[in-house]
């Protein structure tokens, strides 16, 4: 949550008082025709639109149309994107005439239109923005370019960097516009209904220029956020903006979204099909760059985060899964493979690491086998009889998990060792578990120290701007960690396979 001081509020109020909004509609007949054809095809699908076959065809087409309408991309990006998509979808439709004969012709007609962009995709929005910049007298560093999707920031930055009058512009997206920074001018790509109300009602610039394709319908009436009335005549835009082309599209031109329930159901189905007895209670996070990740959500599970609101020495810290909130930056290992804490701890343990890990897995394997043969309820009762006061379904599942080291207290561990017929080695095994725990603690401290060094010497403006940033650690086998801004959190947990935990994956958008 961003808290504004009175001085900050005054800046925003001044922008609101002096606000001037201008609209610039861009003509691109080829894209208008493609959009109209896609819109017509969606109607023709009817009930078939729910079929996975057609969802896989339509979804990327809608995303392509949205992307090239939502950012000033270069010719090269537009064309390469279209060619890759066309090739993919033509392969997908190879047997369409056999499965859906009535839809074969209109679907291939769509791909023929897409082929046009492979050859002649044009950066009409980029050209329009560049033309506008030539008319303005103010310096570029006081201009921000606002786009709807953070995943398009990199391509947008690359595109404007080749144009001198745009190269110093700051590329941003709605989440970052809640910050205090104000500008002389804000260039907004796309229709107003794509953006939160505060972009216009509590503006961060005195001049706002909206750049939008002329085939998109726009019906919008701005509402000021401040209770105190703004001085009459200080604003220079009409009470409402209405643009209604005859072939206008608006109802299906929306930002790609993720069906969290579908992702969760897919993960559950994956577990059911695996036949694996071991699972982890997990929470799904939606991350920047259209990524998702399942994190452990049981017991004392925690994740590593970067908190940009903290002073330098406290920026990197662990928080429990229950404390995670949107806008935090979670750190995940994205190269190097495996758990970086485990690999670092094994180096600390040295040569005995293999033997120590074997002991750790021995008693866990015996406990898992007992649960499989006797059932969880029976195992819980046996452990209670042997002196474990906290034996329960949840705790036993945590103890036998490969992701945990051992029980917290010795009486519970002793009860397990008695039950799995290792009671004569209980003390020796317990000391082994304590040794492993110390190594994990030291490994965590080392990783955090190295990560802090990398974070504190990095330009975190890039992390705030794009919501994603990679950090390479100068430690053998540590690999690299990537910080992702958390955009959303699923409302409920789900049981997933252990290998899904902390492993980012692309989210399929509708």
Image (cartoon, rainbow, N blue to C red):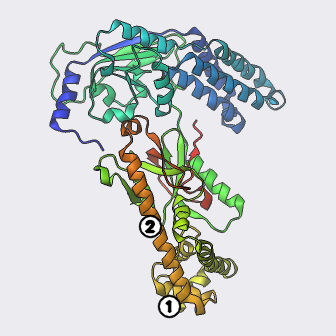
Q: Residue at x 59, y 69 (%)?
A: 402
Q: Position of residue 256 (x, y in %)?
A: 53, 33
Label 1 crowd bin: few (<14), some (14–19), many (20+), radius 10 Å:
some
Q: Residue at x 30, y 35 (%)?
A: 179
Q: Are marks 2 and 1 in contact (CB under 8 Å)?
A: no
In the displayed structure image, the side of residue 250 where residue 337 appears, left or right = right
Frontmost residue, 387 versus 262? 387
Q: Quadrant of residue 113?
A: top right
Residue located beneath label 2 in the image? 442
Q: Residue at x 68, y 35 (%)?
A: 56
Residue located beneath label 1 in the image? 387
Q: Quadrant of residue 131?
A: top left
Frontmost residue, 468 versus 231? 468
**From what the image shows, is residue 96 above or below residue 494?**
above
SS category of the residue bearing label 1: loop
* Quarter of the image with the N terminus in it: top left
Viewer can see residue 301: no
Q: Residue furthest front?
A: 351
Q: Quadrant of residue 230?
A: top left
In the displayed structure image, the side of residue 468 where residue 143 appears, left or right = left
Q: Measure how far apart labels 2 and 1 are at the Cα level.
A: 31 Å
Frontmost residue, 265 versus 370? 370
């Amino acid at each position: 949550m961003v808290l504004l001081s009175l001085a900050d509020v005054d800046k925003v109020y001044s922008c609101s008082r002096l606000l001037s909004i201008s609209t610039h509609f861009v003509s691109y007949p080829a894209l208008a025709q493609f959009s109209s054809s896609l819109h017509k095809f969606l109607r023709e699908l009817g009930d078939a639109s729910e079929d996975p076959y057609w969802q896989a065809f339509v979804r990327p087409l809608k995303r392509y149309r949205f992307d090239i309408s939502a950012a000033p991309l270069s010719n090269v990006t537009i064309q390469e994107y279209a060619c890759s998509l066309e090739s993919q979808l033509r392969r997908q439709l190879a047997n369409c005439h056999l499965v859906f004969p009535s839809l074969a012709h209109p679907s291939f007609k769509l791909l023929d239109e897409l082929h046009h962009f492979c050859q002649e995709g044009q950066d009409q929005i980029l050209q329009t923005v560049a033309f506008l910049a030539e008319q303005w007298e103010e310096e570029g560093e006081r201009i921000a370019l606002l786009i709807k999707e953070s995943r398009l920031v990199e391509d947008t930055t690359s595109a404007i960097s080749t144009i001198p009058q745009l190269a110093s512009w700051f590329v941003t997206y709605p989440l970052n516009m809640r910050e205090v920074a104000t500008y002389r001018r804000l260039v907004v790509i796309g229709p107003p209904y794509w953006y939160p109300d505060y972009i216009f009602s509590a503006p961060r610039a005195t001049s706002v220029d909206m750049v939008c394709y002329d085939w998109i319908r726009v019906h919008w009436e701005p509402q000021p956020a401040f209770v105190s009335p703004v001085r009459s005549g200080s604003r220079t835009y009409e009470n409402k903006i209405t643009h209604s082309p005859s072939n206008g599209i608006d109802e299906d031109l929306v930002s790609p979204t993720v069906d969290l329930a579908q992702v969760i159901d897919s993960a559950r189905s994956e577990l059911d099909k695996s036949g694996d007895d071991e699972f982890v209670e997990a929470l799904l996070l939606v991350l920047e760059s259209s990524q998702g990740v399942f994190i452990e959500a049981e017991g004392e599970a925690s994740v590593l985060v970067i908190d940009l609101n903290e002073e330098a020495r406290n920026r990197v810290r662990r928080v429990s899964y229950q404390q995670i909130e949107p806008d935090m930056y979670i750190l995940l290992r994205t190269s190097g493979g495996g758990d970086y804490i485990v690999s670092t701890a094994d180096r600390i343990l040295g040569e005995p690491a293999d033997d120590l890990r074997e002991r750790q897995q021995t008693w866990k394997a015996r406990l898992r086998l007992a649960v499989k043969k006797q059932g969880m309820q029976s195992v819980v009762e046996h452990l209670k009889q042997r002196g474990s006061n906290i034996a329960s379904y949840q705790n036993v599942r945590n103890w036998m998990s490969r992701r945990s080291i051992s029980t917290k207290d010795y009486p519970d561990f002793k009860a397990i060792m008695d039950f799995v017929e290792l009671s004569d080695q209980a003390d020796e095994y317990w000391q082994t578990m304590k040794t492993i725990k110390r190594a994990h603690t030291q490994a965590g401290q080392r990783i955090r120290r190295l990560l802090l060094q990398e974070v504190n010497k990095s330009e975190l403006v890039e992390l705030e701007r794009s919501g994603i940033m990679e950090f390479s650690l100068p430690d053998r086998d540590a690999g690299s960690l990537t910080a992702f801004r958390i955009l959303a959190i699923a409302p409920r947990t789900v049981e997933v396979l252990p290998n899904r935990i902390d492993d980012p994956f692309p989210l399929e958008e509708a």
